């Protein structure tokens, strides 16, 4: 009995890790530049046929904020998004939603999601050859922006006045 | 992975041509509601998961979106993923539903579903009920807007409380529930304004 | 009352053609590209996104170009566009505490954790026209300074909040579905969620004037900028096809925490209260004005007497939308020939009736 629940726990943990890994990968695909996705698909897609299941189609997402920054949610305003669902030749279905109205970006992002799910070998390959380079590109752009902002940091210094010392 | 299989199942069985199929279904339900008691066939436009019938699936695909929560009685898990993928609609409790798929229409429906308010009578649920057949049952007489005099229908398997619930629903006017009886791909509408009596 | 009037067709067609011609202007001057508008008039684009209530820089740039730089016309175009699109989902609430900061200042704490980051601001510029702007000279790349930490910083209200000297963010209300004025008609009284939605898309000039009025004594508060921050936040959406939340991209927002006025009652000790501003894009003025008006509209919560326009939610919310406002003001130029004829006739009749008794009076005398 105890053994069973232990293995159940392990399975649950593995499932959570799987979800977290896919969440990270899908988030990377959605934020990559279209040119980069196209080039990477060229490299790792092996010319697979991609069949459209739905879309790509443009719609809206209502972006929410929180009252005071951390309170109850409120509707800030909408953002345009593109979503796509595709099926690879192998039958695996992938999904994507990205900000903006770039149909090709959503289609490619969904294709990568499908390829990631195909099997363990493809997942590892997509992780190392697609997800990591995208994350590196994002990190590089963010580092540049952060360093530019950092240069505008105010370093206060106090001037001693009066005759105390 | 079980989750994976369900997600792949969820993406199939939608409209082949979302725009034109939705328009055709919209038009058919509009006509059916304008002429209560007439039967219309929606054709095989989609393949929804159980317990939804083809006409029920088609109506939900055409009419529901993320702002119209759906209640499905006897839901077995697959509906949420299917409706979620194709329409964005969430499955909710009966009290919050804009559309409700019930096994039968009885007074319980009036106790649990939104009936609209006097200021916004449109905020009531639209109910879909699958029947054994839209013909061959006990004859019922319809009267009201959209019917020239009287019209007779004979759906089978409506349940014992049907007529009493219809009468109670009629008394709520302008509030009340609009009902669509379905059988496979066929539909018959009984809007809240229609009076239903034994012949 | 309107009547169908025919005969304007050719005039309208030619007016459209003239508009297109004037929009393009001198053909020997290169046409503006969308990249130029989005890149070099980015604050105009941000305003169109904020008040158009649609985050899409490319589309907003297109609208600015089509509207010849008339921002309210561009906002109108954006609002019209969004009505043609289906809404797929609502995002998870954005986490401004996780913002990748581009600018962050506080007027209340000199040495607040995370520091003061000036960013690309007009403040401290001379605000004199720079002759260099007439040329296309080289512009130096931004200075960079290495930093070990990430670009997050705690929100100032979390710092003060630890001492319980400032009101909290309030109840998360069980994460109830927030009100949405794009889906249901505005009714009064409203909740703070709906007010913030209306203010976030409200006219910058209108909110600025209202915020200013509270400073001049029409709705007393004594505000301090606790913090203004500008930067990028991730947009996360939980989609049924995934079954978990994914990041779909990032948006630039401006957030303002305005700290104001002591209160205190039998239940509550004296503490600072807060107004909140959150706006798409880089728009410090709008976020600050929004936070002032948000605080003024909470008068009832703090047992303050509502005497001024900025404290009257019906007045504020019914007039803050510049598309509604321009629609009703500008409709006055539509043909009112029959209306006006009727009024003219009425006036003539009143004159006639006004004259008659006087004449009769003369006769009786």
Image (tube, coloured by chain):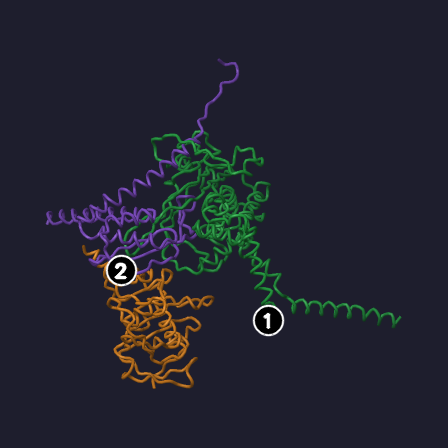
Chain colours: A purple, B orange, C green
What residue is shown with label 2?
Answer: A51
What residue is shown with label 1?
Answer: C4
Q: Is residue C35 above or below residue C345?
A: above
Question: Which chain does the residue under circle 1 lie in?
Answer: C
Q: Quadrant of residue B196?
A: bottom left
* Residue sitting nearer the eye, C264 or C207: C207
Residue at figure coordinates x 13%, y 46% from the top left: A6
* Residue sitting nearer the eye, C7 or C351: C7
- SS label for mark 2: strand
Q: Quadrant of residue B154?
A: bottom left
Q: Is residue B133 above or below residue C62?
A: below
* Residue sitting nearer the eye, A51 or C364: A51
Question: Which chain does the residue under circle 2 lie in?
Answer: A
Can I make out residue A148 in this image? yes
Q: Position of residue A159 (x, y in %)?
A: 49, 20
Q: Position of residue C196 (x, y in %)?
A: 47, 49
């Amino acid at each position: 009995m105890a053994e069973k629940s232990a293995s159940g726990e392990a399975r649950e943990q593995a499932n959570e890790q799987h979800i977290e890994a896919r969440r990270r990968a899908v988030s990377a695909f959605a934020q990559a530049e279209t040119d980069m996705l196209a080039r990477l698909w060229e490299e790792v897609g092996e010319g697979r046929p991609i069949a459209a299941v739905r879309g790509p189609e443009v719609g809206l997402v209502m972006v929410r904020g929180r009252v005071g920054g951390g309170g109850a949610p409120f509707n800030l305003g909408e953002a345009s998004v593109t979503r796509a669902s595709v099926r690879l030749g192998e039958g695996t279905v992938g999904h994507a939603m990205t900000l903006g109205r770039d149909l090709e970006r959503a289609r490619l992002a969904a294709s990568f999601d499908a390829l990631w799910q195909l099997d363990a070998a493809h997942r590892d390959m997509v992780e190392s050859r697609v997800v990591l380079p995208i994350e590196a590109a994002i990190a590089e752009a963010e580092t540049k922006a952060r360093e530019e902002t950092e240069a505008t940091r105010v370093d206060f210094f106090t001037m001693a006045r009066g005759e105390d010392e | 992975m079980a989750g994976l299989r369900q997600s792949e199942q969820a993406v199939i069985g939608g409209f082949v041509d979302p725009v034109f199929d939705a328009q055709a279904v919209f038009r058919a339900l509009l006509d059916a509601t304008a002429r209560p008691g007439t039967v219309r066939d929606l054709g095989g436009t989609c393949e929804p998961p159980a317990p939804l019938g083809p006409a029920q699936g088609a109506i939900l695909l055409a009419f529901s979106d993320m702002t119209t929560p759906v209640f499905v009685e006897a839901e077995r898990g697959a509906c949420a993923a299917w409706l979620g993928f194709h329409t964005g609609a969430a499955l909710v409790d009966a009290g919050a539903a804009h559309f409700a798929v019930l096994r039968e229409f009885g007074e319980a429906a009036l106790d649990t579903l939104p009936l609209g308010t006097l200021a916004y009578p449109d905020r009531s649920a639209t109910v879909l009920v699958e029947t054994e057949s839209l013909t061959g049952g006990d004859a019922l007489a319809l009267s009201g807007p959209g019917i020239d005099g009287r019209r007779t229908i004979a759906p089978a398997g409506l349940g014992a409380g049907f007529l009493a619930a219809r009468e109670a629903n009629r008394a709520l006017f302008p509030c009340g529930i609009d009902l669509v009886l379905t059988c496979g791909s066929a539909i018959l509408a009984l809007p809240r304004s229609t009076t239903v009596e034994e012949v | 009352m309107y009547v169908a009037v025919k005969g304007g067709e050719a005039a309208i067609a030619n007016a459209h053609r003239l508009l297109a011609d004037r929009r393009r202007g001198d053909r020997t001057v290169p046409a503006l590209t969308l990249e130029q508008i989005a890149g070099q008039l980015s604050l105009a684009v941000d305003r169109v996104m904020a008040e158009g209530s649609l985050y899409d820089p490319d589309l907003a740039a297109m609208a600015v170009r089509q509207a010849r730089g008339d921002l309210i016309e561009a906002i109108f175009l954006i609002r019209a566009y969004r009505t043609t699109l289906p809404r797929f989902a609502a995002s998870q609430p954005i986490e401004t505490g996780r913002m990748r900061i581009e600018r962050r200042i506080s007027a209340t704490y000199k040495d607040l954790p995370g520091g003061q980051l000036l960013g690309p601001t007009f403040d401290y510029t001379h605000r004199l026209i720079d002759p260099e702007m007439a040329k296309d000279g080289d512009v130096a790349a931004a200075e960079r300074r290495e930093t070990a930490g990430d670009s997050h910083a705690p929100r100032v209200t979390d710092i003060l909040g630890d001492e319980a000297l400032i009101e909290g963010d309030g109840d998360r209300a069980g994460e109830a579905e927030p009100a949405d004025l794009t889906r249901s008609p505005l009714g009064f009284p409203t909740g703070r969620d709906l007010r913030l939605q209306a203010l976030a898309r409200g006219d910058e000039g209108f909110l600025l004037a209202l915020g200013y009025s509270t400073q001049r004594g029409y709705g007393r508060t004594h505000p301090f900028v606790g913090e203004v921050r500008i930067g990028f936040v991730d947009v996360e959406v939980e989609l049924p096809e995934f079954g978990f939340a994914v990041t779909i991209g990032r948006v630039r927002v401006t957030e303002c925490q305005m700290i104001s006025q002591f209160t205190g009652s039998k239940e509550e000790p004296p503490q600072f209260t807060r107004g909140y501003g959150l706006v798409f894009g880089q728009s410090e003025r709008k976020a600050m004005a929004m936070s002032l008006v948000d605080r003024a509209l909470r008068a009832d919560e703090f047992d303050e007497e509502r005497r001024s326009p900025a404290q009257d939610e019906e007045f504020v919310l019914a007039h803050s939308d510049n598309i509604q406002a321009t629609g009703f003001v500008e409709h006055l130029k539509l043909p009112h020939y029959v209306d006006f004829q009727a009024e003219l006739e009425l006036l003539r009749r009143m004159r006639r009736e006004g004259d008659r008794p006087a004449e009769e009076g003369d006769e009786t005398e």
